[in-house]
Amino acid sequence: MLLQTNCRSGTRYEPLTTRNMLRITYRSMILSAFALALAAPRLMLAQAAADSAAIRAAALDYIEGWYEGNGERMERALHPELAKRIVNTNPNGRNSLGQQGAMTLVNNTKSGGGKTTPMEQRRKDVRILDIFGNTASVRIDAATWVDYLHVAKWNGRWVIVNVLWELRPASP
């Protein structure tokens, strides 16, 4: 193969052949893959941070909406087919399942159910327990109860699909 020299710089270079083009393309692919590998964790962290913020916002719309009697915030937080459940135990030790749908919860919020909670008792501690893909589990420590939320990314928004809740034992 005949090498040529650039007269000004004295740099030697090979003419562009198919083999040289493939080598250049291969190097470009390697460098692109390396750059992507470096950037991907940052992109994933940014998405994870955005998802965490949106999940927390849905949980706060739910609990703060309840305390404020703000039906709009409550409705924004919920999937239309939400199921909110509690396991009740009667004096004989038999269990029953109490449940509410989304619209019942929204209407109870609008009627001011949570506004009766004194300001100093309005706990709203939100803890994201797990996020996997388009699903998450969240715990809210509220005034006299604990809510466990199943949250899903639905049409681009994080909304609450299920709530299982339990009353705190009464203080002696």
Image (spheres, rainbow, N blue to C red):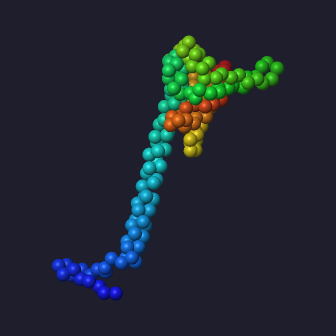
- Asked which quadrant contains residue 62, the reply is top right
Q: Residue, x 79% and y 18% (percent of image)?
A: 91
User: Quadrant location of the C terminus?
Assistant: top right
Relative to 127, residue 124 above or below: above
The picture places residue 109, in percent across and down from the top left corner, at 56, 17
Residue 9: % across, % down: 19, 78
The residue that appears at 58% across and 40% down in the rendered structure is 135
Residue 19 appears left or right of 3: right
Q: Which residue sits at x=78%, y=24%?
A: 95
Residues 82 and 6: in front is 6
Image-quadrant location for residue 37: bottom left
Picture coordinates of residue 105, whole percent (x, y): 60, 20
- Foreground residue among 48 and 165: 48
Is residue 64 at all visible to an observer of this figure?
no
Up-down: is 2 above or below 124?
below
Q: Relative to 16, is 61 on the left or the right?
A: right
| Residue farthest front in this picture | 18
